[in-house]
Amino acid sequence: MQLRYVIALNLTIVAGCAPTFDVTNSTITVNGEQYPFRTSIVDGPNGPYKLSSVKVRSQYHKCLPDSPGDCEAVVQIAVDQRPGGN
């Protein structure tokens, strides 16, 4: 349980350092199932950049929507993982 709080705190600190300009929420479909998909435009030290992630089993996983098939592969890997480890 403590690990979840540490991870959440670290994500909050990292997100707090880079202001988000825009967030787009949508879905992607993999093997007939829909998954929440979000893209954020973040202000980085070298200018704005895009972060994308897909939500599988209540956890977001980073993916590259500009790379064909990447987000679908990320979903498939997350779905195939056994609970509690690799």
Image: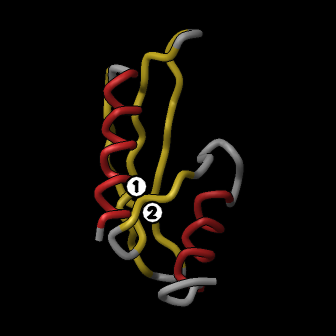
What's the image's color scheme?
A: secondary structure
Residue 4 x/y as whole percent: 33, 63
Check if mark 1's residue and mark 2's residue have beta carbons within 8 Å. yes
| CA distance for labels 1 and 2 | 6 Å
Q: Which residue is mark 2?
A: 28
Residue 78 x/y as whole percent: 55, 75
> How busy is the neighbourhood of tag 1: few (under 14 within 10 Å), some, or many (20 plus)?
many
Which quadrant of the view contains residue 33?
Answer: bottom left
The residue at 42%/40% (across/down) is: 39
Q: Secondary structure at mark 2?
A: strand
Residue at the limit of the structure toward the front, as seen here? 2
Which quadrant of the view contains residue 3?
Answer: bottom left
Q: Is residue 55 left or right of residue 83?
A: left
Q: Nearer the viewer, residue 59 or 63?
A: 59
The residue at 62%/47% (across/down) is: 64
Q: Secondary structure at mark 1?
A: strand
The type of residue carrying mark 1 is Phe
* On screen, residue 66 above or below 73: above
Q: Which residue is mark 1?
A: 37
Q: How many marks?
A: 2
The type of residue carrying mark 2 is Ile
Specify the quadrant that holds the N terminus. Answer: bottom left
The residue at 59%/59% (across/down) is: 71
Mark 1 or mark 2: which is in front? Answer: 1
* On screen, residue 71 above or below 10: below
Which mark, residue 70? none
The residue at 65%/42% (across/down) is: 66
> How busy is the neighbourhood of tag 2: few (under 14 within 10 Å), some, or many (20 plus)?
some
Residue 45 x/y as whole percent: 54, 11
